[in-house]
């Protein structure tokens, strides 16, 4: 097994992906951390709502750098603002919606790593460092790829 090496990834650096309407940067991957964690930075447009979903393989954590989001975890709603941290343990259904009129910037990390593979497989390489044109996701494709990564898509985010 190859020894994990220290590294630095700067702001707006890392593999840039257009993922479900967001501009996402893969900061740390299974390969770069020896599987210990995955980290992505996302710029997500106002009004975006993730599907309600559950992870079976990893815990998912969110740190809001900018913006505001409503998180629904196991049916309970919380509002998070810049500087807030939200923890979503594996096997607990959750999702979020970006509130307000401005995009949010979120650090999303998973423990252990693996979710970043889902991001790169569902998304596409960003051709510029800007939000992509909004397009509805192919739900069938999303559900199929999510299952491959131990994620169940439960449906739209509850109101």
Image: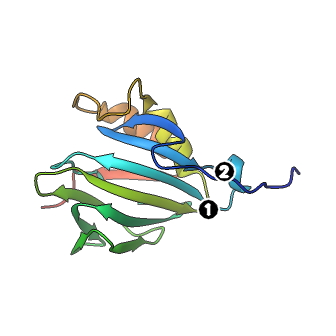
Q: Is residue 40 left or right of residue 48?
A: right
Colouring of the image: rainbow
Residue at the extreme top: 127
Q: Position of residue 18 (x, y in %)?
A: 38, 34
Give the residue drawn at x 26%, y 67%: 71
Q: Position of residue 92 (x, y in %)?
A: 40, 70
Q: Is residue 111 left or right of residue 119?
A: right
Give the residue drawn at x 69%, y 56%: 35
Which residue is label 2 attached to? 30
Q: Position of residue 34 (x, y in %)?
A: 74, 55
Give the residue drawn at x 36%, y 72%: 86
Give the residue drawn at x 51%, y 42%: 13
For the residues labelled 1 and 2, the Cα–Cα distance comes to 8 Å
Q: Is residue 34 left or right of residue 124?
A: right
Q: Are marks 1 and 2 in contact (CB under 8 Å)?
A: yes
Which residue is label 1 attached to? 112
Q: How many marks?
A: 2
Q: Quadrant of residue 133?
A: top left
Of the image marks 1 and 2, the number of the one nearer the N terminus = 2
Label 1: how many residues lie within 10 Å, few (<14), some (14-19) or many (20+)? some
Where residue 6 is drawn, which disc sits there? Answer: none
Does residue 149 appear in the picture of this structure?
A: no
Front residue of 81/10: it is: 10
Label 1 secondary element: loop
Q: Quadrant of the C terminus?
A: bottom left
Q: Position of residue 66 (x, y in %)?
A: 28, 60
Does residue 28 appear in the picture of this structure?
A: yes
């Amino acid at each position: 097994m190859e020894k994990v090496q220290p590294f630095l990834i700067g702001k707006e650096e890392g593999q840039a992906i257009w993922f479900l309407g967001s501009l996402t940067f893969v900061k740390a991957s299974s390969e770069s951390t020896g599987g210990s964690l995955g980290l992505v930075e996302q710029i997500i447009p106002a009004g975006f709502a993730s599907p309600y979903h559950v992870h079976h393989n990893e815990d998912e954590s969110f740190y809001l750098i900018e913006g505001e989001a409503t998180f629904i975890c196991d049916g309970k709603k919380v509002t998070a603002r810049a500087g807030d941290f939200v923890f979503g343990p594996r096997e607990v259904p959750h999702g979020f919606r970006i509130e307000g009129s401005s995009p949010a910037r979120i650090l999303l990390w998973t423990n252990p790593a693996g979710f970043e593979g889902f991001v790169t497989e569902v998304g596409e390489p960003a051709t510029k460092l800007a939000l992509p044109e909004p397009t509805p996701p192919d739900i069938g494709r999303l559900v199929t790829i999510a299952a491959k990564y131990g994620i169940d898509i439960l449906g739209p985010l509850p109101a």
